[in-house]
Amino acid sequence: MDDVALAVVTALATKGVDTVAAGGRSAVSALRQLIRSRFGHGTEATLLADFEARPDDAGARGRLAMALLRAMSHDSTFAAECSALVGAQLSVNHGGVVNVIGGRAERTIQAQSIFGDVRL
């Protein structure tokens, strides 16, 4: 699956680090609006609504990701806009570290570089 499509769905599901995008809207809100505008009111819009109702459902996430992948493969402008918003939202293009954890974690370590052993 395309990394950008997966990152878009992950950003929407987790609401990520909600930074402000151009125009004063949050990156997640701008991303959601971009997808709504592109999907319109057809089958793809139903997939988005299903995902929004059940963001933890792996099937809903997968169906939305596949719809996004199809849309991005047919519309390079849409793909570039999604990519830019995901980049702004996650800030991963500047050497940052992003952890996305689903469910409960007893212990979590976030690190960019570790030299030597790690013991808990």
Image (cartoon, helix red, strand yellow):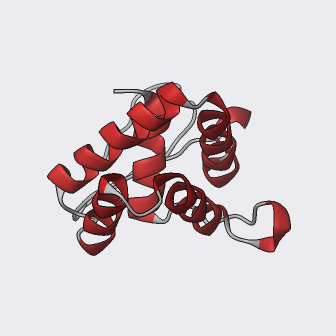
Q: Position of residue 48 (x, y in %)?
A: 35, 61
Q: Is residue 59 left or right of residue 3?
A: left
Q: Position of residue 60 (x, y in %)?
A: 21, 55
Q: Which residue occupies the extreme front position in the image?
A: 42
Q: Residue at x 56, y 59 (%)?
A: 37
Q: How many marks?
A: 0
Q: Is residue 50 above or below residue 85?
A: below
Q: Is residue 69 above or below residue 19?
A: above
Q: Position of residue 112 (x, y in %)?
A: 57, 35
Q: Is residue 119 left or right of residue 85?
A: left
Q: Residue at x 35, y 42 (%)?
A: 67
Q: Residue at x 67, y 43 (%)?
A: 81
Q: Position of residue 20 (x, y in %)?
A: 75, 66
Q: Indicate the quadrant containing the N terminus: top left, top right, bottom left or bottom right.
A: top left
Residue 114 visible within the image: no
Q: Is residue 115 above or below residue 45?
A: above
